[in-house]
Image: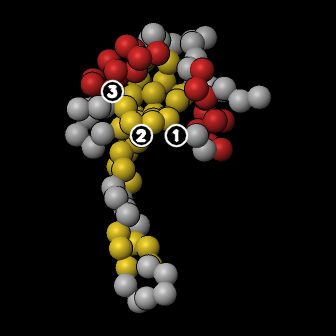
Amino acid sequence: MRVIRKPVLTEKSLQEAAEGKFTFEVDLKANKNQIASEIKKAFKVDVQKVRTRILKGKRRRIRGTSRQKKASVLKRATVKLAEGQKINVFETG
């Protein structure tokens, strides 16, 4: 099972990155301990706290018809690192 899928690069997540909080899209079945250990292995950082949330899939209208489809459910994890540590994926400029 691949725990970390991809980093979430939104305006809000980039602002939080300056505070030492980094957001990732993770597997739905992953728990906080698995997420913390995978991030520690992948980026060589010390994880202090992990917060997770599940985002429901929104309904999307199929163009040209009256039918709808449902987008998939996502799970995101925000990870707080030790003071002074950072992940290079979130750097801008």
Which comes before the other along the chain, label 2 or label 1? 1
Task: Give the residue pinned by disc 1.
Answer: 8
Q: Nearer the viewer, residue 85 or 90?
A: 90
Near mark 1 (Cα within 10 A), the count class, few <14, some 14-19 or many ≥20, is some
Please give left or right for residue 40 compared with residue 87 in the image.
left
Type of amino acid under label 1: Val
Q: Is residue 84 placed above or below 11 in the rendered structure?
A: above
Which comes before the other along the chain, label 3 or label 1? 1
Look at 51% across and 13% down and name the residue there: 82
Look at 31% across and 31% down and name the residue there: 3
Dot 2 falls on a residue whose secondary structure is: strand
Please give left or right for residue 23 compared with residue 2 in the image.
right
Give percent across and percent down for residue 93: 77, 28
Please give left or right for residue 19 compared with residue 73 in the image.
right
Q: Is residue 39 placed above or below 65 in the rendered structure?
A: above
Q: Are the residues tagged 2 and 1 within 8 Å (C-beta)?
A: yes
Give percent across and percent down for residue 1: 23, 32
Q: Is residue 74 placed above or below 25 in the rendered structure?
A: below
